[in-house]
Each structure stands twice: as structure tokens, then as C-alpha cells.
Amino acid sequence: MRSILKTSAAAIAVLAATLGGASADGLTGNLKIFLDTSNPAPRATMEEMIAQFGEKNPDLTIETTVIDREAYKTQIRNFLTANAPDVANWYAANRMRPYVEAGLFEDVSDLWAEPAIAENLASTKGALTIDGKQWGVPYTYYQWGVYYRKDIFDELGLSEPATWEEEKANCQKILDAGKKCYTIGTKFLWTAGGWFDYLNMRTNGFDFHMDLLTGKASWQSDEVRKTFANWRELIDMGAFIDNHQTYSWQEALPFMVKGDAAAYLMGNFAVAPLRDAGLTDDQIDFYQFVEITPGVEKAEDAPTDTFHIPSKAQNKEAAREFLKFVVSPEVQTWINDGKHLGQLPVNAKSSVDNDKFLEQGFEMLSTNSPGGVAQFFDRDAPAEMAKIAMEGLQEFMVKPDNLDKILARLDRARERINK
Amino acid sequence: MAQASVAASRQNSWWHRNQQRLTPWLFLAPGILFFLFYVIFPIFQSFNLSLYEWDGLGQAEFVGTYNYEELYWDEAFYTSLKNNVIWLVLYLAAIPAGLFIALFLNQTVTGIRLYKSLFFFPFVISQVVVGLVFTWFYDPTFGILNVLLGAVGLPPMNVLGDENWVTVGIIVAGLWPQTAYCMILYLTGLNAVDPEQIEAGRLDGAKGWRMLWYIIVPQLRPATFIAFVVTIIGALRSFDLISVMTNGGPFGASRVLSFYMFEVALSEYGFRMGYGAAIAVVLFMIMLAFIAYFLWSMYKEERAR
Amino acid sequence: MFPTPIERTSRTWRISYQTLLPLALILWLLPLIAVAIFSVKPDSDFANANYWGWPSSFEGFTNYALVFTGSDMPQYLLNSFKITIPTVIGAVTLSCMTGFALGVYKFKANIWIFFMFVAGNFVPFQILMVPVRDLTLQMGLYNTITGLVLFHIAFQTGFCTLFMRNFIRALPFELIEAARVEGVAEWRIFWYVVLPLMKPAIAALSVLIFTFIWNDYFWAIVLTQGVESQPVTAGITSFNSQYRAAYHLMSAGSIVAALPPVAMFFLMQRHFIAGLTLGAVK
């Protein structure tokens, strides 16, 4: 497999000619694109999308570099300062803040002022906005929620819960049947962040959750303690699989596949490996995380992946065209369909693919998330705080009695980081 | 080259007069420059950087001893420090273990050479692979450790998921190649043991453990010294195994200073370069005590020549 | 000889030693044997919880073929060679020179320069992490094989100098004296007198450094970050995240990654062991 795909203009021109002539936008020069989509399916999708853009711009030489997803997270610091591409992908919200503040991302508010984007991408505008300006465009997002084994639920006579009491009652029945309620692998910590996001948003609401993650609210507050008390109910029941601290999220999948655990709080990307492992769509289903405090508006995690133009880019004109191309309704429709990314399109004019999880997710996010849309624990909180906090969450899941110590530690970190 | 005439003309040349004095410096120059540039200066840069706050992107900000004050309050730092001490102590087990295996293999039966090299095998394998294999051994669902524990009627344990066992578990994995290393040092050392002294000891009635302790071990001093040096260095540098086996977890319980430093400075959620440098300085100070001791021993030996 | 040679002991002890030996070896190498067996198992064995038993069918070819065709492993292996071989050449060359200078000449700073190399070699190399990474970035060598090689050469020079200097010290000094009396230039003494005598040390050191550099993981993840420049130790971790929980493939990948230094060790065994003990024990 080659990681650098160089597409020469000549080859594209030939391709364009054989396809019957796409019109040129008149872009010239080089366009360097850095991507972190190293997994096979996203990688192929991105390469296909870029090839399409190349067809439309035969005079443009596009050079794509795909970097390993994990490596990319540290490498971005280097290439933005030393060796900037013209386009790079990244994540929305606080995750892009360090680069915005260091002046490494280009202000693209002008794109957001164009009606085609202003009207159709309104729902994600907030996630791309810092200091009243927009610093990139989204290209995909996906829902989080509870993926569960429908066949196990049916066998035990359970139905999708809607309230916290129902959730716990279901769980008790699952435990009585000798299974665990939830699989999870917290070795790399962030999965515990997902549980906290939901428990805290349902217990205290979206606004409090954001205040907490951005350092405005205290970790030792009564609200936070209530969230942990709710979490502890599940832990004390023995709802989570044992030894989760030694597994990655992928290593936790077999528990659900084998039927040792009934459900998984995860992002929609978990569906593909579950299907690959042999589960059919009749065996898996999805429900929105239940209500906990009645009256608190439901809010969801829906991490948004984004494209940005580094401020040191050479060909910003072509980069802007590329961003516009990516968010256009047609492109959004096909790159996010089940054969490609299998996620949700960001453009309101696009259509969601005919896939039961995508449809449910889209429905949930567009009609049943009045409280707001969060990015995810480690994207909403500053990186340093996220790390310390998620470690505390993992510790709590293993040693719930350490809660006071953990919360005191997190508060000290909060004070230092937000000083 | 016309040897004779050249030799004659350079008899009195400046170069010839100073040749003996200058040659070593010319030979040393590339090595020293490289070493200064990549090793010695960076040590001082780390000291300097530890006084700054820097995220690797913007301008570094001078904060004095702030990073060190932070360390003082940082529980993760104390956990790392404690684990470093555990590493230092337990890792030394490689020395007696290596000696034991060396004694076991110090025979002349057929095929012993092959045995010796196969016993040494673990040392040439990357720690990344060693870590992976031991992770599977400890795996709570299918690991062979729990199979064995079950066979003798003990409850299963999750070594790498238990904050009290995790460091010990990783050290055991590290001891495997390190013992092989010490073993090879001792095997060579045993070759050099003076047979006459052994015979003399035998005549005096020394046997088994007494012979080992009073006659053999003193003669193995040079090997022991080197084994000590490489084991201490190995213990303080431990990084690969932790990174592969636990990534520092569960909840940071298996961190050591070298890993924590990497985590705060270069990992996904890191980029506190100054803070990382401050941790590096602490680790360096611990090492300095040992380096001073090593150099002092070598210095004495040099003088004795 | 200690312990007492086995031939001179009782028959029972002799027989029990002969049986103990292979048993001990198997126990000692159990982790490796396990990986080797894992690597030829079919996928289904892991699904059926047949972890430690005998493979239900031999899938070695399939598994290893997948490592070479279904992943970036060949590229990582190539990178490892491209990193390791220049480093060995560079570090050995530099240290032949420094070792010669420090081993043959007597001058005041000699011992201090020697100690600088030794101390630098003992330093917990993590202290160099941030500055060296920065330096490499500034030189535009971040994420390049060159950047990694240059650092490795510099750092290994410390250990190699210790090794070479001690070796040269042990050479008969009269040879050098004799050459000097005949008026041979110093560099010619190095080239024609000392260097030929250093051949065993060069061989030993090369094998040793090859293993050290091949197995390096830390600097690989600090100074490089992609398929185009990372060596196989770092590659194996991304290989593993690609095939997480596919234990047969992870095992096959690990074995492929571990093989070159193992082959090196068995081919050059005598040099290797001489190397480990020579520079060290002297």
C-alpha cells in the first residue's frame, strides 16, 4: 500500500476526457492535502472524492498524503508550523482551539457567509466557531448512543428503555440471565468519557456539562456528584464487563458479539465491526440514551470531523474551492453513504443513506436533541484536562470508592489549566 | 608519492613537529562534534526548557521554577517516581537470576553451545514484541497465567488491570531479556575464573554455596559490575514495555518518569514541553548519582593501571 | 571449572541434568514458542477459545502472506534496514576514530573526553527527547530516515567509543611504537597498523549496534511518524491496531519484525557474544 498518492494532471485530464468532459474551474498549481483517514474505507472514500475534484480541475496537481490516524494527532503540530499543506483534516470545537489561537488555521468566515453554506450548514456552525469566526468546514459527523443485541432483548422480553428506571430494570434482568449489560474497553480512556458525557448531560443538562468541561463549573459540585452517584448505581450492580481497563474499544467488541454483554454505548463507527463479526441487522439495534433527570432537555454527542486551511498554505484559492466542493450536497450524500463513510452528511440538502442506524441517528439528532449537540469529552474539554479527567473516570469505574480523591484532583487540575 | 623527498621536507615542518599532539584531536573532532550536538547540548537545553512553559506551537514563556512547583503537587509524578524505585529494585533480580542460569549452563555436554545461544535469544528480540507476548500471557479472558492459577486452585487475576500488580507484571516481562543479558555476561566471566583457586578451595573443603560465595563471586566482580550498570540503566530507561503493555494505565498506575515525560510532552493530550523537560531533569538527577558512581569506579580502575 | 563438570558427578545427577536442560529451555522460551504457534493458527481457533492448544489447522502460509501483502510491513522492514545499516556504518566509523585517539594518545583531556562519551551513553535518553525532536524539526529532518539515522549515530558513538577505546588499549602498544620509530605518519599507523587489528572489534560492534538500532522503539516514535519513515518496531504497533484481536496476524507480524536481528545473532553469534563481553568486561 502506498501512502502518498500522486495524481498527475495528465492522467486526470485523460480520465476527464474519457468520462466525457467535466468543466474546469480554472484552478491551477498544486494542492497538497493531508489526511488522517488511514482506515481502509475512509481512505478509499477520500481518495475517490479527491479524484473527482481533480477531474473538475484538470490543471490542478493534487498531492494527497494519508497519515496514520493516531500519528496524525501529534504530527499536525509539526506540519502546520514547518511544512504546511493546503488542506488538512481535523476535529471541531476545542480540539481545534490551540491551532486557532496559535494562528495556524486560516479564517474561512468568508465561505460561511456564502448563502450555499450559511443556509445548509447552520447546524454545525457553532462547532466551527471560535471568537465569532469560522476556522474550517465539517465533512462528516456521527451519532452516539446505545447499540444493543436485539435478539438478547427479545429473548429476555425487554424493550428499548426510555427512562433511567427502565434502563436499570432492563439491566437487572440481563444480569439475572448471567450476562453483562454493557461492554466497554477503557484502556485508552476515551470510552469512559462517552459514558460521562451522557450521564452528565442527562443528569444536569447540556449547559452545565459544557461549563464543567470548559472549566467554569467545579468537579466537586453537587451536580457532578449526582452524576457519579447515578453512574455508581450501574457499577454497583455489576453492569459493566470485568477487566474493562485492560481492553481497547475493539477488544471489547467480542463480548457483545458472543452475547456475553448486551449493549455498547458507542459511536456509529461500531456498527461496521459488529457487522463484520457476523451480527446481522436483525440482531443489532440502536436506542437513544435514556432520560435521567425528568425535564432536562436531551443533548447528544455527535463528533464532527473537519477540513481546515493552514494559514501557511500556498494555494488558498484552490483550498477554498476544495472545501466548498466537500460540503456540497451531492458530495456529502455519497461520501457519507453506507458504502463509503457510513456516517451523517453535514449539508441539510443531502440525503441520508438508507441504513437503519444512519436513519435513526439522523432522526435523533435533527428532532430529538433540543438541548444541543456536544462534540465529545476529549474534543470539548482542553486536551490536558481531558486526559487527567478521563483517567479519573477510568479509576472511578474500577474503584468507585476513590471518588472524593479523584474529584479533588480534577478540581486542582481545572484551577491550574484555567488560571 | 615520492616517499624520500617528502619525508625529508617535512622533517622540519610545523605539522611534523606537532603531529603527535594534533592527530588525536583530528580523529576526535567528528565524533565529539556529533556527540556535543545531539547529546550534550540537548541535556543543557532540557535544563533550560524546564524553566519555560511551551506548547510546541507559540512562543515559549519563562516561568522560573513553576514547572518544578507543579511537580511537587502532581500525584502522577509521585506514582511515576515510586514505580521507578520499584523498577530499580526488582530489575536487579536479573543479576542473580542471570548468574544462576549461567551456572546451570556452564558445562561441556554435547550441544551446550546451542543451548547457551537459545537461552540468550530473548535479548535480541525487540521489547515491543516481548511486551505483546506478555500482554497475552496476562490477558484476563484467555491468558495462560489464569489457566495456571486455576490449575493450582488460585483465583484468576488481571495483572495489567490491577494498580497494585501492574508494575510488577511489566517488570517480570522486562526481566526475561535482561536475565538473558546478565547470563551471557556471567558465562564469559565464569570462563575466566581461575581453576587453581577452585582447586585450592576444594582442598580447603569449600563446596556448593560456600565455594560460590567466597571463591567464585569475588572473581566475577567485573561481570557483576557491568551487569549492575546495564541493569540500572535499563531500569531507568524502561519505556517500550510500558507503552506497549498498558500505555501507562490503569489510571496511570504503571507510569514511570520516562513514560510520563513522553506523555506530557509528546502524546495526544500532551504538549507541555517545559513540564516534560522538568520531569526529564529529575530523572537525570537520579541517574547522575549512578553515573557518578560508575565513572568513579572506572576512574579508580584507570588509575590502578 | 565451577560448578563441578557434569562428567565428574554421579550418574543420576548426570542423567537428570541431561533431561533438565531441554525442559528448562522450553520453559524459558515458552513465550516465543507460544507466538510461533499463534502465528500458524487459523482465525477460527481464537473464536473457539482454542488459545493455547494445538492449531486445528496449519495456516502459516496464509497468515504470513497476509502480513506481506495486506499491510505496510514490507515498507516498514525496508525502512528498518535503511535506518539500521547507515547507523552501524556511521557509528562504527566515528568510534574507530575516537577510540583510536583515546586509546593510543596520552594527553591531559583524554580521560575527560572519554568520560564525556561514557556519561552521555549512560544518560536516560529521554532527557534528550524534546530538544532533539526540536532540533530535527528545525533542520527539516523530522519524519525522515536521515533525521533518525543522524541521531542514532551520535548517540551510539558514546557506547561505541567506550568499546573501541577499551579494545585498542588492550592491543600491543609496541607495534605502534615501532611504527613511529620508523617515521610512519600517524594516520598511516591508524590505517595500516591499528585498523587491521580492530577487525574483530568492528565485527562485534556492528552486530551489537545492528540489534540495538533495529529494536529501537522510543526514538522511532519521537522522530518519525509515518509509513514512509518508521521502522518495523513502530510499524508493528500500527499493524496491531489494524488487526486488533487478530492474534494470529499480530503474532506473524511480530515474528517477521523480530527475525532480522535473530538471524543476525545466529549467523554472527561468536562476534555478538564477544562484543557484549569484550567492550564491557575489559
Image (spheres, rainbow, N blue to C red):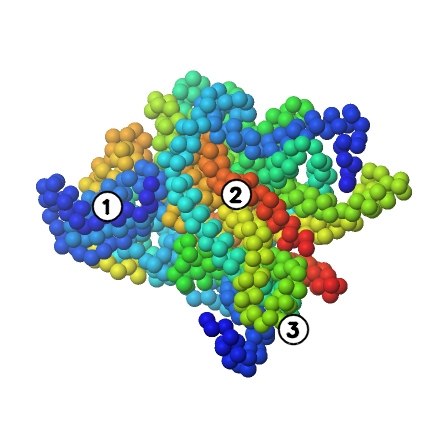
Image coordinates for residue B8, horizontal then vertical, percent: 53, 79
* Amino acid of disc 3: Lys
From the viewer's side, name the closer residue of B5 and A152. Answer: B5
| Vertical side of A313 occupied by A402: above or below | above
Q: Position of residue C237 (x, y in %)?
A: 46, 42
- Name which residue lies at 71% across and 38% down: B106
Q: Residues within 10 Å of mark 2 (few under 14, many from 20)?
A: some
Amino acid carrying mark 1 in the image: Ile
Give the letter of the chain under mark 2.
C
Image depth: mark 1 or mark 2 in front: 2
Image coordinates for residue B256, horizontal then vertical, percent: 59, 50
* Same-subunit check for callouts 1 and 3: no
Image-based side of B191 in relation to A281, left or right: right
**Residue on which disc 3 sits:** C108
What residue is disc 1 on?
A: A50
Would residue B165 be seen by someone viewing this image from the given angle? no
**Residue C150 relative to residue C175: left or right:** left
Residue at mark 2: C264
Q: Is disc 1 in the same subunit as disc 2?
A: no
The residue lying furthest to the right in this view is B204
Residue shown at the point (49%, 36%) measured from the top left: C255
Does any portion of residue C238 appear in the rendered image?
Answer: yes
Q: CA distance from mark 1 to mark 2?
A: 45 Å
Instruction: Using the image, determine if residue B72 lies above or below residue B202.
Output: below
Q: Nearer the viewer, mark 1 or mark 3?
A: 3
Q: Is residue B27 left or right of A16 when viewed as pictured? A: right
Mark before the other along the chain sequence, 3 or 2: 3
* Chain at tag 3: C
The residue carrying pointer 1 sits among few (fewer than 14), some (14 to 19) or many (20 or more) residues within 10 Å by Cα, namely many
